[in-house]
Image: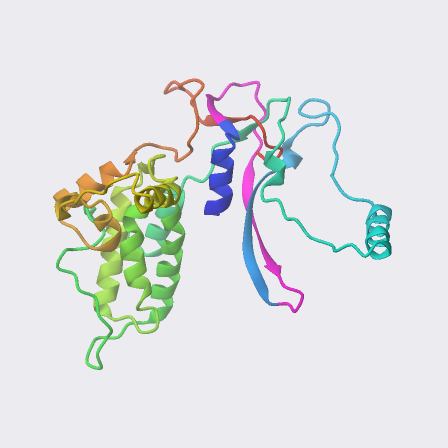
Amino acid sequence: MSEEFNALLKNGTWVLVPHESHQNLVGCKWIFRIKRHADGSIQRHKARLVAKGYNQRPGIDFGDTFNPVVKPVTIRVVLTLAVTNSRPLLQLDINNAFLHDSLQEDVYTKNFLSQHHYVRKLLQLAHMDGAKEVTTPMATASHLVKSSNNAQAIDPTEYHQLVGGLQYLNLTKPDVAFSVNKLSQFMHCPSNSHWQARKRLLRYLKSTINFVLHSKMKHLEIDVHFVRDLVQREDLRVSHISSKDQLADLLTKPLSKQQFILNRSKIGIQDGSSILWGSVKAIATPSLKSDMIKDNNSNVI
């Protein structure tokens, strides 16, 4: 999902615009597929964000429809030429090929991928929607270890269900990445201490329903490789950073309230109601009921 979403951002697929009454709203959803090798083993998992095209009206939202396919006779001709001339055959897979073209029409789709509703569902599932909020996902004194024989064991079914659900939040909430990873290490035999740590994380998530990840983090991996190359070529000198200024501590250890909030703000997690990035064409007034996305160059948004 991260690769697909980053590709949409990189290609400038949309801009945010306010909702107007004449716009036909097209919904969208994630489609997941498993790509397999010839022997049936899993090659990779694929995710695509697609529009619900059946919401569009013929003659109003679109004129003609098409599906780019290759004719079987074309494949036979290519294979015949390759065999006749003893030529090798190579396969080329172009990622996100549909993004490399532009639409002339304006297509409007609903705002998507906000995980606020998902967090609320997790809280309801754990019966913690009325729990008291906390400001950090894990206590600094928390030290989770493997359960001993004397530790109070719990039913792992609900623990597996909720911790598995928390994995999905890592897409837009890097501030909980360390806590989720830590809890996931005890899926085989959770104890009461792991259960309490899970409850604290849910209490923190309740307090962050209106926090969003801004664009400072979306190119982190690219930035790391770029800086590393500069250092290796000695074009950049890296200075020592004191431990109190290490932003990566947010992702690797539990922090105090003050340090956690400071690091969280520095990596770009801020208040907001949408995690969509892009150029904002116009700012919606409070009376508008929903934000819209105006498609620039994708036939799936």
Rendered position, 189 above or below 175: below
Q: Is residue 12 visible?
A: yes
Q: Residue at x 85, y 51 (%)?
A: 81
Q: Residue at x 58, y 44 (%)?
A: 95
Q: Is residue 21 magenta?
A: yes
Quadrant (top left/top right/bottom left/bottom right) for the C terminus: top right
Tell me residue 188's x, y (percent). Answer: 34, 73
Viewer-side residue, 39 vs 78: 78
Viewer-side residue, 145 vs 218: 218
Q: Is residue 286 left or right of residue 254?
A: right
Tell me residue 62's x, y (percent). Answer: 69, 26
Viewer-side residue, 91 vs 289: 91
Tell me residue 175's x, y (percent). Answer: 28, 47
Q: Is residue 74 left or right of residue 122?
A: right
Q: Is residue 131 visible?
A: no
Q: Which residue in the rendered view is the most extreme toward the bottom?
A: 149
Q: Is residue 242 magenta?
A: no
Read off the magenta span. 15-40
Q: Quadrant of residue 84?
A: bottom right
Tell me residue 204's x, y (percent). Answer: 24, 48
Instruction: Count numbered badges in the picture.
Output: 0
> How are the residues colored?
rainbow
